[in-house]
Image (cartoon, helix red, strand yellow):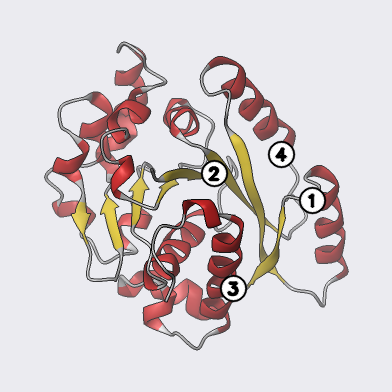
Amino acid sequence: MGKIISVANQKGGVGKTTTTVNLAAWLGAMGQKILLVDIDPQGNATSGFGINKRSLVQSSYDLLIGTVQAEDVILSTSFPGVDVLPSNIALAGAEIEIVELEDRAMRLKKALAPIKPLYDFLLIDCPPSLGLITLNALAASDTILVPIQCEYYALEGLSQLISTIRQVKRLYNPTLDLEGVLLTMYDGRLNLTMQVVAEVKKFFPQKVYQTTIPRNVRLSEAPSYGQPVLYFDRNSKGSAAYGKLAEEFLEKNRGFVRRKAE
């Protein structure tokens, strides 16, 4: 049985999509079978794997409103081990439509249930909000991975995120757990970075990844070429960092690893 992990933070610009795309690519390269589920209307995780989101016939929007099955939407990619359940701007109006539907918070969980056993890990790229779409992701997930940028406003809104997680546990998903907290845009030369790291570790004891993600130009450039940084520039600092994250992630998830990492 696969494990579903939401990559979520209601703050934008924290490296959420970058993390989802590049962790998925590295895990796939290490022999895992990965499904990237894009439920952000911007569809950046979709285009990050070279898929033209403007030409999609079906997307996660159709899945959430219940007009298609997951297997009808999933696309294979040219990158080893990774499939994508794509998104595009059509999803922007989904929250309004889903409100009127039965089991509005559980629609993604029900949609993913039939295909969950086909993958080792299903990574959900969430929108930068705590609305109904993100609620669907958290209700469907086994764990949540939270990227936090090492900047002044990093901890702003964290209490709201924690409150939302508690509410989801109480109402929809009692087994939801914190997968880990990933520090992004890391620069160890700055005192501010060290202060943010200390505060985050206070907030989330024992849950902060040892691996940190630095600011890196190649990480920023790779999406415009429709490639994860592993394939765009394998030797870059950004690629190396996500490779280390993937190793740390697999070490913590040995019980879910069915295929030998290469």
Query: Distance of mark 2 from mark 1, alpha carbons?
Result: 16 Å
Judging by the rendered image, the residue that carries numbered circle 1 is: 200
Q: Are the residues tagged 2 and 3 within 8 Å (C-beta)?
A: no
Q: Residue 158 carries which label?
A: 4
For residue 128, above or below residue 161? below
Question: Depth-wise, is mark 2 or mark 3 nearer the camera?
Answer: 3
Question: Depth-wise, is mark 1 or mark 4 nearer the camera?
Answer: 1
Query: Distance of mark 3 from mark 4, alpha carbons?
Result: 25 Å
Quick one: SS at disc 3? helix
Specify the quadrant of the image occupied by residue 193: bottom right
Label 1 or label 4, whichever comes before in sequence order? 4
| Image coords of residue 20 (percent x, y) | 46, 57
Label 3 or label 4, whichever comes before in sequence order? 4
Of the residues shown, which amino acid type is indicated by label 4? Leu
Specify the quadrant of the image occupied by residue 208: bottom right
Q: Is residue 246 left or right of residue 225?
A: right
Label 3 or label 1, whichever comes before in sequence order? 1
Of the residues shown, which amino acid type is indicated by label 3? Lys
Judging by the rendered image, the residue that carries numbered circle 3 is: 244
Label 4 or label 2, whichever comes before in sequence order? 2
> Measuring 69% from the left and 32% from the top, which residue is drawn there?
162
Query: Distance of mark 2 from mark 3, alpha carbons?
Result: 20 Å
Q: Which mark is residue 8?
A: 2
Of the residues shown, which amino acid type is indicated by label 1? Val
Label 2 or label 3, whichever comes before in sequence order? 2
Q: Can residue 240 be seen in this view?
A: yes
Quick one: SS at disc 4? helix
Q: Which of 243 and 64 is in front in this view?
A: 243
Q: Is residue 33 left or right of residue 153?
A: left
Q: Residues within 10 Å of mark 2 (few under 14, many from 20)?
A: many
Q: Which of 106 and 44 is in front in this view?
A: 106
